[in-house]
């Protein structure tokens, strides 16, 4: 009988801890940097054949974007080129290199009024130390004055590269915060580690 009572007590304590954790997380959101602010996660992400992870149906950056949205309760917008990149990795690399060299601005599908948001997370894969050109197409459509931008990227060794400074140049008048860089293969194959890194980063920014 004592064992049953003890087990029930442990179960109750565990349930209370889970509830308390959820309440604490919600409280942090309300009292942190997103209090009374509208938050958006805008990201570029590619499926198909990717370096180090093979053929994928959900892009590395999309995985991180969805985690950020879930943690912060923010809206999501996928920056998609009007003409999709080739599925084959080498073909995509060749096209993306050409676009980078010519500073192309490929057309993108749809739009979202970033002007209606206070904080905008911008996500992308790091391609040769830069953002994919469709991200610039998206950025140049909008007025960033007074906005807070939070960059995050997936990569296979380059980290954020020089993308933080490039974002600052492209988004005049915005405040750009410390970014997050996650290995693409980690995002794709180790969701637990990715969630841990994403959560820690958001907490460091008081989100």
Image (cartoon, helix red, strand yellow):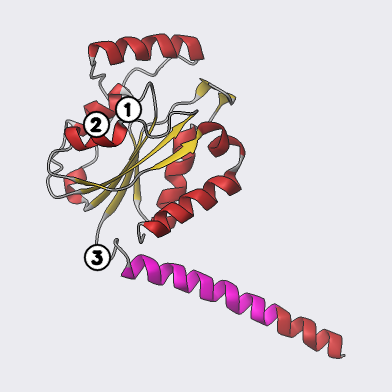
Relative placement, left or right, of 6 versus 196 is right
Dot 1 or dot 2: first in sequence order is 1
Q: Position of residue 119 (x, y in %)?
A: 25, 51
Relative placement, left or right, of 120 versus 157 is left
Q: Quadrant of the C terminus?
A: bottom left
In the image, the segment drawn in magenta is 11-31
Whether residue 28 appears in magenta in the rendering, the answer is yes
Q: Main secondary structure of the magenta part?
A: helix
Q: How far is the residue under mark 3 from the one under mark 1?
A: 30 Å
Q: Quadrant of the N terminus?
A: bottom right
Question: Which residue is more in the foreground, 24 or 206?
Answer: 206
- On screen, residue 130 above or below 13: above
Identify the residue at image location x=51%, y=32%.
Answer: 184
Dot 3 or dot 2: first in sequence order is 3
Mark 1 touches mark 2? (CB < 8 Å) = yes
Dot 3 or dot 1: first in sequence order is 3
Mark 3 touches mark 2? (CB < 8 Å) = no
- Dot 2: what SS? helix
Disc ID at residue 36: 3
Disc ID at residue 166: 2
- On screen, residue 124 above or below 100: below
Q: Position of residue 91 (x, y in %)?
A: 45, 9
């Amino acid at each position: 009988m004592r064992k049953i009572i003890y087990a029930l007590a442990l179960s109750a304590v565990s349930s209370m801890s889970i509830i308390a954790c959820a309440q604490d997380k919600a409280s942090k959101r309300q009292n942190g940097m997103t209090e009374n602010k509208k938050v958006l996660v805008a990201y570029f992400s590619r499926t198909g054949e990717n370096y180090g992870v093979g053929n994928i149906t959900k892009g590395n950056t999309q995985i991180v974007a969805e985690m950020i949205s879930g943690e912060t309760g923010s809206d999501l917008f996928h920056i998609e080129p009007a003409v999709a990149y080739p599925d084959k990795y080498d073909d995509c690399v060749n096209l993306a290199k050409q676009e980078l060299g010519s500073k192309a601005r490929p057309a993108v599908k749809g739009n979202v009024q970033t002007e209606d948001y206070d904080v905008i997370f911008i996500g992308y894969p790091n391609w040769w130390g830069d953002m994919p050109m469709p991200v610039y197409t998206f950025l140049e459509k909008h007025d960033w004055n007074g906005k807070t931008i939070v960059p995050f990227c997936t990569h296979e060794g380059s980290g954020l590269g020089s993308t933080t400074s490039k974002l600052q140049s492209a988004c005049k008048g915005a405040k750009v915060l410390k970014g997050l860089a996650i290995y693409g293969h980690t995002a794709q194959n180790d969701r637990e580690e990715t969630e841990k890194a994403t959560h820690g980063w958001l907490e460091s920014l008081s989100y």
